Structure formats: C-alpha cells, structure tokens
Image (cartoon, rainbow, N blue to C red):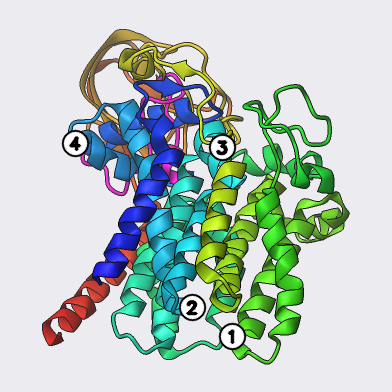
Amino acid sequence: MKKDLLVILLLILLSTLASKSLFIPGAFTSHDLTHHVVRQISMDKILSEGQFPPRWSGDLNNGYGYPVFLFNYPLPAMLGEVFHKAGLGFVDSVKAVLFTSIILSVVGMYLFLKSLLGNKLSAFLGSIFYLYAPIRFLNIYVSAAVGASLALGILPFVFLSIVEIKKGKKWAPYLGSLSLSLLILSHNVTAFIFMPVILIFAWPFKKQMITMFLFGIGLSAWFWLPAILEKQYIQFDQIYNGFYKNQFISIQQLLHSPWGYGLSHPQNPELGDMSYQLGLVQILVMIILIPFIWVFKKVKEVRKIGIFVLAGFFLSVFLMLKISMSFWDNLSFLSIIQFPLRLSAIAIFCVSIASGLLVKYLPYKKILTIGLVILVIYANRNHWHTNEVFNPGEDYYLNLKTTTTTYYEDLPKWGKIMDKPSVGKFEMVGGIGGIKELKDKSVQVIAQVEASKSGEMRFNQVYFPGWEIKVDGERVGFEYLSSGFPTFYLESGKHLVEASFKNTPDRNIADLASAISVIIWGILVCKLLLKS
C-alpha cells in the first residue's frame, strides 16, 4: 500500500505539467468554457431553489427558459457546485472540475492497470499514456469539454470494477455501478461510445456484473431516461442530422496536424483549426504491439488483452475515417456522437493498456518505462497550455443568459432563441392590467394580476411538457404553438396566477427508478460494510 501511494503521488506530481495552466488566474479562450461557467451559475441557482433533480433553468435563453439539464450531462456542474460552496468562484469551480478529471485519470488508470496486469511499472506507464495524449489536452484546453474530460477520469474505475468482480471481490459491483452511473451523468456521449467496449471487456458476464450494470443504469435513470424519451420534443435531431458527414478525419491528420485552438473543419481545414492527431508515440506503441502479440502468442494474457486493444484501436480509427461513412449512414444511432474524433478516446484508452502490456513482458523494463514516459511527455509539450487568458470577471458571466449550447439544439421544436431579455415572467398581450410577481423560481412563478380589461396573458417561458398554469387555484388551458409560449385568456378582475413545471409520467418513472436504486444500493453497501 505504501509503494502504491508513492507511485500515485509521483503520478500526481507528473500531472502538474498537464494541469499547471489551470492555475493561471481567470478564464481562458476556448470553445465551451463560457458555456460551462454559465451552466455552473444556473446549477447554483437551480439547486439553491430546491429543484432536484435539476432540469429547467428559468434564467437561460434571456430569461425565457431552457431545459438545460434535462438533456445536458449534470454531474460536472453538480461537482462544480461542491467547489463553489467551498469558496471558489464560478470560473474557478469549472476549472477545478477539469483539474479533478486529470487527477482521477492517472489514479484510476493506475489502479485499473495494476489490477489487470499485476505490475506497478505497467500501471504507471499506462497512466501517463492515458493523460499525455493530444485528445486529452484538446478536451481540456482547446474545447474546455468539461463533461468529456470528467467522464474520461471516471472511466478507468468502471474497468477496475469489472476486473475486481472477476477476481471475486464483493465490493466491486457497488463501485462499478456507482462509477457507471457517474460516467453516464458526466458525459452521456462518452458513456455511449464506451458502452460496447465495456460490455466486451466484461464478457463473459457474472451475476455480480449484471448487478453492476442494473444498478449503474438505475442510479442514473433520472437523467438518461427522460433525455431519451423527451428528445422527440427538441430540435436536436434536425440540427445534428448528418452533422458527422463533414467531420471525418484523414489518416494524415491523425498522424500529424498543427496544434491550433480554432474549430473543427477537417474536410476543409482553416488556419488555426484544432488538431486531430492521435499522437505519434501512441501510434508507435500500437505498431510495436502487432509483432509483440505474435512473439508472445502462447501467453494467454498477451493474446487476450493484446487482441482486445488492437481491435478497439483500429476499429475506432476506422470509424474516424471517411471510408466508414456508409456505416454511419446505415447505423443512425452513431449520429449521436456528432464528431468522429471523439472515438479517439477509445484509441487512447487502448494504447494505455497496450503500453502497460509491453512493459510487463519486454526486457529492460525500468529503462523502457523511463524512456517512454519521457518520450510521451516531450511529444505533448506544446499541448498542455491555454491559448489566451480571458478574465472579464464573474459579473460578465452572471449577466450572460445564453442557452449554453452552441446550436441551441435543446430548444423545443416550437421554440425560438430570444435575443432580448424578457419583460417579466408574465405579460399581458391582449388585455390591460397590472402584474406583481410574488415568487420567481425556475419551476414555479406566482403573480398577483389585476386585469382592468379581459384579454390574453402570456407566460414568458418557452413551453415544454410539464408546464401547467393555474388561475385562482384552477388549472387553465393554454395555446403555445403559435408563439412558443403558453398563452391563456384572463377575465377582468383580481387573480392569483401560478405557473409550475411538473414532472411528466416519464420523469416520474425515471425518478422512481433512481430512488429505488439508491435505497437498495445503499442498503446492500451498508450490509457489506457491517460484515467487513
């Protein structure tokens, strides 16, 4: 244990090179950091209002509302809220989540590879390879993809649990189910990408693995189930249908492409575009692995693990190339991935295992490990930096009321982007009267209305299933398709008007599934702890 702790401390120390730019005061220019800071602010407000699970933000879309956490992975902002409550500002809270993803990466991969290969040097090297890869720095410093970064930090714990289940460890299914649920909540696309890899790695299934998967799916059901069932109401599919067609990468770009901080245009590159490279050292390791498997083909571990990582590596590379377009066209569910480059996460995961496997069986282990560590860190020396410091202050982000999604893809099909702040949550659009708001929360707005003339009144929140309106305690019907906002008729006189965002049957089922899973999971974990 002491030796493991020393190795982990060394890994954290070596991670400082990868994370040092996160400690520069202020934010930095990137694709998505501003989105995540605004989401962090929204999460803080939503949770402070008592909304759990967090789903609807009444402030986004310029105060007209947005189902931000109904469809966007909530865990990064929930973890960020822990840092915020500990005293960090909103920007620093998001950066703290990125830093956490780095530490989880090296610690999780070390524990996983040590359990899988039983070799500290292998686990140490694989951890360094897992972190020091272009796609990891692309996620952190170019895209600021907080969800994808955190998911890759949690991922090794899922695989660690599977290895420990195969060894008969009783605690492993519970760690595995927790890790799997956190993976889904961190970044649903990463979870989707890796699910086939996880299932293949877990085969043949044991009873404990089924327990792990059932609890993992159940614990996170409150998020993923409504996201799937209610996706039919939003603009996502019409925006991202065929989006992947212009995002395929060439072999040359995978081998080398300039490191930039711009957007992704692999088919028609522009000056300053982001890089698409896998990493020459990573590719070298996979090339060496091919003859290595042949030489050690009689060793079951080499043959089994080697073939697994080779297949995963080359299949993920194939799906990133344009020659795989027919697969994408015929397997419509692949469009969820949006960017084929995201599959490079599988390639890097496989490379990390491969590097550990090589070191375990090749001679001159210590020299080889030191050499490869130096080589892979040196090869990524230009990647672990931000582009430019962008430090406008917290007030800048507090005043932003965007949708926090690039293409507004989570807007309902009948909704629209509002470029001006709302005049209030309720508005007279036909009649005449005075409005006094008594309560203004994301999921409940109450107003005292004194209408001197009957007419239509509008609730200035984009309609989404779950909104209901009451006048003087009685539910009223409303129309929303023409404007996107619930509009209803109000008689003259004094009225108490209330709008509430309620759970749909789908959300109720999802919440119930998660609640039952949490209770049973907690009871079983407590029983296990009492026995030990």
**Is 530 left, or right, of 520 in this rendering?**
left
Name the residue that disc number 3 marks: 381
Q: Nearer the viewer, residue 269 or 25?
A: 25
Q: Magenta stretch: give its range.
A: 50-70
Which residue matches tag 1? Answer: 301
Please, what is the three-letter code of the amino acid marked with disc 4? Lys
Q: Which residue is mark 4?
A: 85
Q: Quadrant of the N terminus?
A: bottom left
Q: Residue at left 52%, top 50%?
A: 230
Lower sequence index among marks 1 and 2: 2
Helix, strand or loop at label 2? It is helix
Residue 242 point in image, percent of width and height: 77, 44
Q: Residues within 10 Å of mark 4 (few under 14, many from 20)?
A: few
* CA distance separating discs 3 and 1: 33 Å
Of residues 48 and 511, the one drawn nearer to the viewer in this rendering = 48
Q: Earlier in the sequence, mark 2 or mark 3?
A: 2
For badge 3, the amino acid type reads Arg
